[in-house]
């Protein structure tokens, strides 16, 4: 892979700034005062145990769930104070790659990728087709546009999902466990795709949710570890690799003994 | 599995009473929540009609699904309902030599009651269940989350076309049901039972008023609304993977069918 050089200090102001985020479902306190910055142009990866609340974090950022307390600022605007219509308008600046793709199974890959353009932009059909084919080429899916999602492999579905996320030139890309359920070869291919996308689109700030350590250290500019509802450690990947916190070391190395109960 | 609730405090003899009150409270809360969900889907679904974008292509697609694709099942049900009703009423009317009233009886029963109710029940079994299954699958596979993440209001996108299609198409299908039901009754009455065609047709004309037909069609529109709201709500709030989709689909059919029959009583009493 080509080297992306986005050192911490060179990265811009936080594009997404989260402070004191709390969310509970009944008696289960998922987030308990989470603080996190997603910096402009960086790939920030949040790692953590399964069920630690990583996907909940993405839904809170998109405004699909409301937190019990805390603030989420996107480019300095507190999204929790936005009325629903403005929140929907803000979501158009986001692209989201879901864990299993979440492609519309009644539509072809072409129609799936064209969907956000048809909904939000009144484009002539030729211009729409040009943008759809460009997005498909971006993720290496040329020639598959006529297929239905059920005819694609897991990795291809995630590529198509990324094409759909990219087609409207978003400012933010959110990935929910993009390599879950894939074999090592397809995992490496998706990692490369995330890396190359960041390389080709330096204007996009990405937030990746993952518990795949190999993938994390391939793609991340910044790594944050979520545990017990809070970010317990964060920093550049090489710093996190040698972090002194035993929680971080146990998680990264996948060890059974340590402070994280198994 | 959720942990068992702690035993209620207080005197041991009072515990069954407290537990009973708790159960009633939980059931009441769940019922109010269910009602709220249906009201929310109805409100948002109707509200989306007033805001752009207007998705005319989706409306027609749903009308084709609810209306045209239900045509064969409604016609088969209608013909045989009319035919069997003619057979049964002939048995009753032949006791006092009034077989000529068979046609008008079938016509009145079909246009006022059987047409709207049986059409709505048949369409609920076919289209209402499909609404719950389709939207439920979209929920559990995160397709509804994907709509929201792309800034598309999911109720306006998924529910509004189905509401509109059901309100328009169930009355149209009920009209078809009435027509083929009377044809079925005519065939059995005139060709099989030997009732004279003149009185058979004339009495339908005498006894069945336009008000009977419009009243029946109004009820059919209300039943279409009930079917779509229940089907879409069950689908929209589906939880728990494939099993959850199955549960939502079954409940959509059962709840909508029961609600249609209850609504029929109240609408009929209001119209009489």
Image: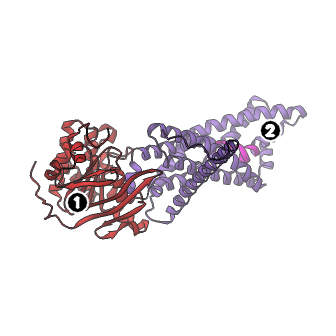
Chain colours: A red, B purple
Disc number for residue B166: none
Quadrant for the C terminus of chain A, please. top left
Pinpoint the chain carrying mark 2: B
| Residue B66 location (% of width, % of height) | 53, 46
Label 1, residues with CA under 10 Å away: few <14, some 14-19, many ≥20? many
| Residue A33 location (% of width, % of height) | 35, 59
In this view, the residue in front, B228 or A69, is A69
| Residue at the right extreme of this rendering | B96
Asked if residue B63 lies in the magenta stretch, the reply is no
The residue at which mark 1 appears reads as A205
Asked if residue B114 lies in the magenta stretch, the reply is yes
| Residue at the top extreme of this rendering | B192
The residue at which mark 2 appears reads as B102
Label 2, residues with CA under 10 Å away: few <14, some 14-19, many ≥20? many
Q: Which residues are magenta?
A: B108-120
| Residue A62 location (% of width, % of height) | 35, 59
- Residue B150 is at least partly visible in this image: no
| Residue at the front extreme of this rendering | B11
In this view, the residue in front, B236 or B45, is B236
| Residue at the left extreme of this rendering | A2
**Secondary structure category for the residue under label 1:** strand
Pinpoint the chain carrying mark 1: A
> Which dot, 2 or 1, sits closer to the camera?
1
- Residue B268 is at least partly visible in this image: yes
For image coordinates 15% across by 61% down, the residue present is A8
């Amino acid at each position: 892979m080509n080297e992306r050089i986005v050192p911490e200090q060179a990265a811009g102001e936080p594009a997404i700034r989260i402070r004191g985020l709390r969310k509970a479902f009944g008696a289960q306190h998922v987030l308990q005062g989470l603080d996190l910055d997603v910096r402009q142009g960086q790939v920030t990866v949040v790692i953590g145990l399964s069920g630690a609340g990583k996907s909940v974090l993405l839904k809170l950022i998109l405004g699909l769930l409301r937190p019990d307390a805390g603030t989420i600022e996107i480019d300095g605007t507190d999204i929790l104070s936005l009325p629903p219509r403005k929140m929907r308008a803000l979501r158009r600046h986001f692209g989201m790659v879901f864990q299993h793709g979440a492609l519309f199974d009644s539509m072809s890959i072409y129609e799936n990728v064209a969907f956000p353009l048809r909904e939000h932009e009144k484009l002539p059909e030729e211009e729409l087709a040009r943008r759809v084919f460009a997005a498909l080429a971006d993720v290496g899916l040329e020639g598959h546009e006529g297929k239905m999602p059920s005819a694609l492999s897991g990795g291809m579905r995630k590529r198509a999902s990324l094409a759909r996320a990219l087609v409207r030139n978003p400012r933010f890309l959110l990935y929910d466990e993009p390599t879950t359920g894939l074999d090592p070869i397809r995992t490496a291919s998706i990692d490369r795709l995330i890396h190359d996308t960041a390389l080709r689109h330096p204007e996009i700030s990405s937030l990746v949710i993952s518990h795949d350590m190999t993938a994390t250290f391939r793609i991340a500019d910044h790594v944050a570890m979520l545990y017990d509802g809070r970010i317990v450690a964060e920093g550049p990947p090489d710093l996190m690799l040698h972090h002194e916190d035993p929680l971080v070391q146990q998680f990264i190395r996948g060890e059974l003994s340590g402070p994280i109960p198994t | 599995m959720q942990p068992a609730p702690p035993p209620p405090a207080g005197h041991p003899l009072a515990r069954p009473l407290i537990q009973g009150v708790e159960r009633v409270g939980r059931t009441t809360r769940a019922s109010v929540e269910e009602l709220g969900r249906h009201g929310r889907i109805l409100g948002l679904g109707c509200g989306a009609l007033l805001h752009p974008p207007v998705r005319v292509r989706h409306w027609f697609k749903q009308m084709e699904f609810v209306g045209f694709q239900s045509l064969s099942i409604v016609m088969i049900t209608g013909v045989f309902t009319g035919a069997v009703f003619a057979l049964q009423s002939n048995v009753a009317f032949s006791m006092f030599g009034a077989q000529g009233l068979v046609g008008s009886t079938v016509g009145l029963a079909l246009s006022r009651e059987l047409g709207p109710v049986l059409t709505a029940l048949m369409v609920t079994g076919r289209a209402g269940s499909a609404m719950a299954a389709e939207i439920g699958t979209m929920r559990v596979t995160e397709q509804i989350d994907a709509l929201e993440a792309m800034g598309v209001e999911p109720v306006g996108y998924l529910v509004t076309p189905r509401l509109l299609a059901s309100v328009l198409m169930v009355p149209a299908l009920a009209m078809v049901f009435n027509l083929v039901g009377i044809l079925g009754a005519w065939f059995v009455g005139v060709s099989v039972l030997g009732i004279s065609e003149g009185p058979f047709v004339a009495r339908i004309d005498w006894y069945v008023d336009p008000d009977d037909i419009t009243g029946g069609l109004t009820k059919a529109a209300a039943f279409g609304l009930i079917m779509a709201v229940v089907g879409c709500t069950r689908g929209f709030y589906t939880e728990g993977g494939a099993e959850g989709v199955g549960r939502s689909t079954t409940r959509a059919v059962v709840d909508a069918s029961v609600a249609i029959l209850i609504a029929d009583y109240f609408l009929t009493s209001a119209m009489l």
